[in-house]
Image (cartoon, rainbow, N blue to C red):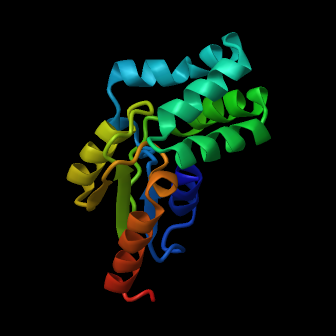
Amino acid sequence: GGYISQAFMERFPRKALAFISIDSAPLGRSHYRTWELWGLKHTFLVYIGLPWQLIIWSGANGCAETAKGTLLMKRMMLIIEKWSTASSLAMDTRNYLGKNKTYRLECPTLLICGDKDRAGYTARCNQQWAKEESNPVCWVEGAGHNANSDNPTEVNLLIEAFLEQQHLI
């Protein structure tokens, strides 16, 4: 959802009142190292080459720090198909990271990231994203890549405080 939201905001500037990213990553290539872009471009081959059950196990256990978060991730992955997941990753990389373009969000932005997020380069990219665009990044304690599944109470409090600060609620 994070890539799609950023692409929408880039295509339709000033339509969004705010952007809240939960364990997403920026679209701009400048936020990624060369070898990270190479790895992302080849993720499709990894997904196609490995057994789907292994990908589900790895995704569920690699993206969550709590039993509930692991279960939610596994359920989500069981709903979608292997080809759909691989195609989506390839499309995101090709359409957004493949362009040598700088994306800059023009609305108030809150970056939320699990302090134990080990999915791809998300944690490092959020640090750089926050620094380069002067957006706050809030680290959710004890949470993995799906911080809202591992620690929904803290994530909801962060979102509510941000929206109040922006006078949106």
Residue at horizontal 41%, vertical 42%? 28
Q: Is residue 164 above or below residue 82?
A: below
Q: Residue 110, percent across and down?
A: 36, 64
Q: Is residue 147 above or below residue 144?
A: below
Q: Residue 158, percent across and down?
A: 36, 70
Residue at horizontal 39%, vertical 36%? 29
Which quadrant of the view contains residue 117? top left
Q: Residue 78, percent across and down?
A: 75, 37
Of 120 and 91, nearer the camera is 120
Of 81 and 10, nearer the camera is 81
Q: Residue 27, percent across and down?
A: 45, 44
Residue at horizontal 41%, vertical 78%? 160
Q: Residue furthest top?
A: 49
**Number of numbered discs on residues:** 0
Quarter of the image containing the C terminus?
bottom left
The answer to whether residue 71 of the structure is visible from this angle is yes
Residue at horizontal 25%, vertical 45%? 127
Q: Is residue 7 above or below residue 128?
A: below
Which quadrant of the view contains residue 137? bottom left
The answer to whether residue 98 of the structure is visible from this angle is no
Q: Is residue 24 above or below residue 62?
A: below
Side of 2 where 75 appears, left or right: right
Q: Residue furthest front?
A: 67
Side of 39 where 130 appears, left or right: left
Of 9 and 36, nearer the camera is 36
